[in-house]
Amino acid sequence: MAIVLNTKFSLGLTIIVYLLLTGCSTHVVVTGEHPPVLVQPLDYNVGLVLNSSFTDYSFTREKDDQKIIITLGDSQTQLFSQIFEGIFTSTQRLQVKPQITTNPMDLVVIPRVEKLQVSMPDETSLNVFEVWIQYKLEIFDTNSALITEWSVSSYGRTQTRFLKSTESALHQATNSALRDAGAQIVIGFNRIPKIRDWVKRKTGSNNAR
Amino acid sequence: MPDNTLLSTAAWSLLLIAILAGCSTSSIVDEQRSDTASLELSSGERLVIMGRRHGNSYETEPDFINCISNNVANTGKFSVMPEQEFLDTLYPWFEPRVAPLKLQGMSKTLAITVVADRIKAIGIRYVIWVDGSTETTEEKGSMHCGMAPSGGCFGFKSWDKTSSYEATIWDLKHLTEKGKVKVDSKGASYMLGIIAPIPLIAQVKGVACEDISSQLKGFFSQ
């Protein structure tokens, strides 16, 4: 009888310790499909370099004994692949920046996450979950020369009253921020002054041949 | 003993008064039309109802848009495309940051061939933009709940809600604004704590949805 009680006591204690250790932690793995982009593709061969720091990206914040982890590597990899496959007629996904001689491409794009910020409902007067993601895209030409560095700041939010849990709210706010980033890249890419100049030069040299 | 009966009767009367008077919702509906004729919707043409979400301080709730879309679609007279399906089909041209706020902007969006072709392919004739939100304006009182078995909830809490929404109808065929519907609803809700909490909730947002839906339906049917 004493052994049974001891076993039950140990099990109960283990559960309590586990809950105490994990209870103040929120881990969100961002999933879900992004819609295909509706855009007239530009006729270029582009290399999209998604290295492991991008594909495995995870954000961690520890504040007031509350730990938040948002894993969005898979989701942003899918988003960026889909976006660039939509913007250009040919997109090759790469893990490292290619050598000029082995694999000539019109453009090489290397995105990275510069910053991710999370705001919880009790931290603002708006009573919403907010997520900001800042991306930096390095864009290189055929000769591997840097054309420009482009910063994209995206934002997503979710109102608390629509959702049941912190996890689902942060998931939805992150997905909104990713969707916003996608919209800005699709619409803004060929509006970047240095990209427009590059397109003009490229079109001019193609016409001259 | 008779005192207890009197007390009990008074409590129940108060509760009944609160139920009857407390949850009332008032609503003001205002409508503007560009002309008196009904809006035409040929076979194969559809409409979409979308929420405005470009503001910093609020965004039109997706559940409110779903409520209007379902109410309008349930008449069986019109084909209504769900908001999310429209947003995904036309991604990224109607995302909060880039969606056209005025007809001039819509004209620029429709000048993009792939967008115009897609809108034509899915048969969208009218876009109805809904802008607004429901806010809790005033909270009073308090309620305390204790743990079982000796506990229970005691106290009284009340709050007011205000819904304010404006719907604007755009005709994509002629690139004109066909009308506006504005709805302002107000209501007070109560929570009575008599051992168990008794909620008396005013359906402010529901009333706003019903009102705006029936006005919008009126634009199309004659």
Image: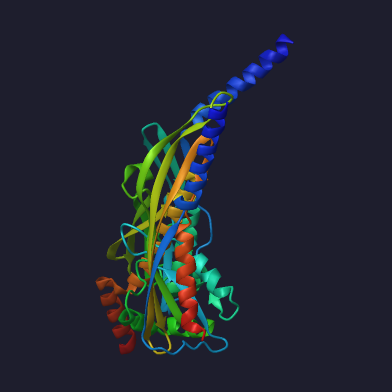
Most extreme residue toward the top, as rendered? A2
The quarter of the rendered structure image containing the C terminus of chain A is bottom left
Most extreme residue toward the front, as rendered? B2
- Work out whether A29 lies above or below A110: above
Q: Residue at x 44, y 78 (%)?
A: B127
Say whether residue A90 is visible.
Answer: no
Q: Position of residue B139 (x, y in %)?
A: 36, 45
Q: Position of residue A202 (x, y in %)?
A: 31, 80
Viewer-proximal residue among B41 and A18:
B41
Most extreme residue toward the right, as rendered? A1
Please give the count of numbered marks on the rendered protein.
0
Viewer-proximal residue among A2 and B192:
B192
The answer to which quarter of the image holds residue B37 is bottom left
Viewer-proximal residue among B201 and A32:
B201
- Work out whether A45 lies above or below B185: below
Say whether residue B205 is visible.
Answer: yes
The answer to which quarter of the image holds residue A49 is bottom left
Viewer-proximal residue among B100 and B166:
B166
The quarter of the rendered structure image containing the N terminus of chain A is top right
Q: Position of residue A39 (x, y in %)?
A: 43, 77
